[in-house]
Amino acid sequence: MTSIRTRIAPSPTGDPHVGTAYIALFNRCFAHQHKGQFILRIEDTDQLRSTSKSEQDILASLRWLGLDWDEGPDCGGEYGPYRQSERSAIYQDHIKILLDKGHAFHCFCSSERLDALRKEQMEQKQQLGYDGHCTHLTAEEVTQKLEAGEEHVIRMKIPEQGDCEFEDLLRGKVNISWSQIDMQVLMKSDGLPTYHFANVVDDHLMQISHVIRGEEWINSVPKHVLLYQYFEWEPPVFCHMPLLRNPDKSKLSKRKNPTSINYYRDMGYLPQALVNYLGMMGWTMPSGEEKFSIEAMTEAFDISRVSLGGPIFDTEKLDWLNGKYLREDLDDISFAQAFATWAFAQDRVARIVPLIKQRVERLSDVADIAHLFVAGLVSVDEATFAHKKLSKEDSLAILQFTLWKLEALPDFERETVEQCLQELAQTLDLKIRDFLFPLFVAISGKPVSVSVIESISILGLDISRARIRHAIEILGGISKKQAKQLEKDFRAM
Ligand code: GLU
């Protein structure tokens, strides 16, 4: 039997998402259950959106969860490089194969032409997609255009008729009509591959036997299957996992639920509890046991038992499970150690101590001030937000605008946060002291505290966001209508 190889292929374009950890867990269980390998590949072909900070965060958070990998950009392996930006020559070689075989073609259409085509298709209520214009160019015309240096992309050809039929491990046969599939761009005008092309080439070259990924990719399978056929390669087994959902059944989104793994770490969840909880998404242990380790899950794993009903990611259930871990798995000494490691990480302490030292006369004064750094949400009431120069609406606007600004920051260094808040205060024509007041209350629960700018910088986006959102709720929340107006004002700034 060929060996079982699975992979997780995150794009480093933002916070490490719990959905990535969920898919990593199932891939890892499946591979290790079969004594195979679990691989981590970084799909960073979108140069504008990919950042190395996001890549580092993804690696660190998966490692924190104990979801380590057998081959990857950090530890290497036989099939590297494991970062797509380092594999350009491989994609160049492979696109030549498809061009030579006539399965791909150069497309010189301008964005104006493509926009007009799209508009027309929308007006005529036709299927959107490329109309094959450049498939009619002769070989001489293509050569001439290339020699003249005309900007172009490379697209794949798609059958004009019939259906694509493929097997999904959990769904059985799936049929998708070719008429719904666009002549996908494989190589962009910058010479870099698109997701679809690089993903298939790499899955093949890295000998991935099973592609286990989120359901959102199922409509891409026809393009992938066709690429395997064009290359005359054996396709892997496809398995699309159900998407995680908010308690109201909508797709898990950060508007309704924290989605960053960092949030769960910073809130003081134990990694083994979070992994266990992710293992309950679409999966139940044959024994019915709800508390289980990754090793136990790997041993009992049977992918065909994954249920397709959308699993609900419910933080209340996670709280219950985490509490169980804290009580049952940690004796008093390990509990104290776990708390100390979480609360007093050295780099944090180094920043917190100078803030506290200035304000205390006795060591017994410390806990009261330090509380804000070792809490999740802080308790706060509406009356504390009362301020002579700011109405409740002003405070709500300040909190919401700050949140949007913080979410867009490239980093959380003190200077970056400070500059961002100062600019916002200026735009709102407020004195910095007045502007910062609702933030003081939201972040610390008190009208006066240590520097709120420094606090936000130390706490980071996830905890700051949770507290600001909590404060907005305490102040009565923002209606849909108000949110629309605020968004408009924000964009006009
Ligand atoms: N880069 C894709 C992502 O970000 C990978 C999808 C796949 O697993 O094929 O999710």
Image: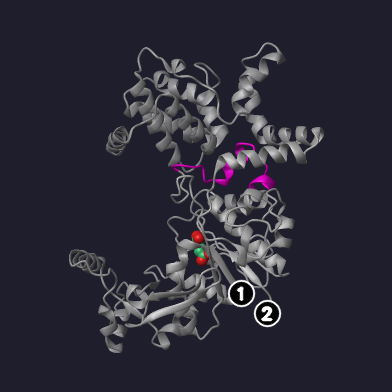
Q: Residue 182, percent across and down?
A: 34, 73
Q: Secondary structure at mark 1?
A: loop
Q: Which residues are magenta?
A: 255-274
Q: Are marks 2 and 1 in contact (CB under 8 Å)?
A: yes
**Residue found 45% across the figure and 51% down from its top:** 251
Q: Amino acid at mark 2?
A: Thr
Q: Amino acid at mark 1?
A: Ser
Residue 459 tag number:
none
Q: Is any part of residue 231 visible from this angle?
A: yes
**Picture quadrant where residue 393 is located:** top left
Q: CA distance from mark 2 to mark 1?
A: 8 Å
**Residue found 67% across the figure and 45% down from its top:** 273
**Residue found 48% across the figure and 77% down from its top:** 166
Q: Is residue 63 above or below residue 231?
A: above
| Nearer to us in this view, 340 or 174 | 174
Q: Ligand 1 near label 1 (Cβ, under 8 Å)? A: no
Tell me the residue that label 2 is attached to: 2
| Nearer to us in this view, 436 or 382 | 382
Q: Ligand 1 near label 2 (Cβ, under 8 Å)? A: no
Q: Residue 173, percent across and down?
A: 48, 75
Q: Is any part of residue 192 visible from this angle?
A: no
Tell me the residue that label 1 is attached to: 209
**Picture quadrant where residue 82 is located:** bottom right
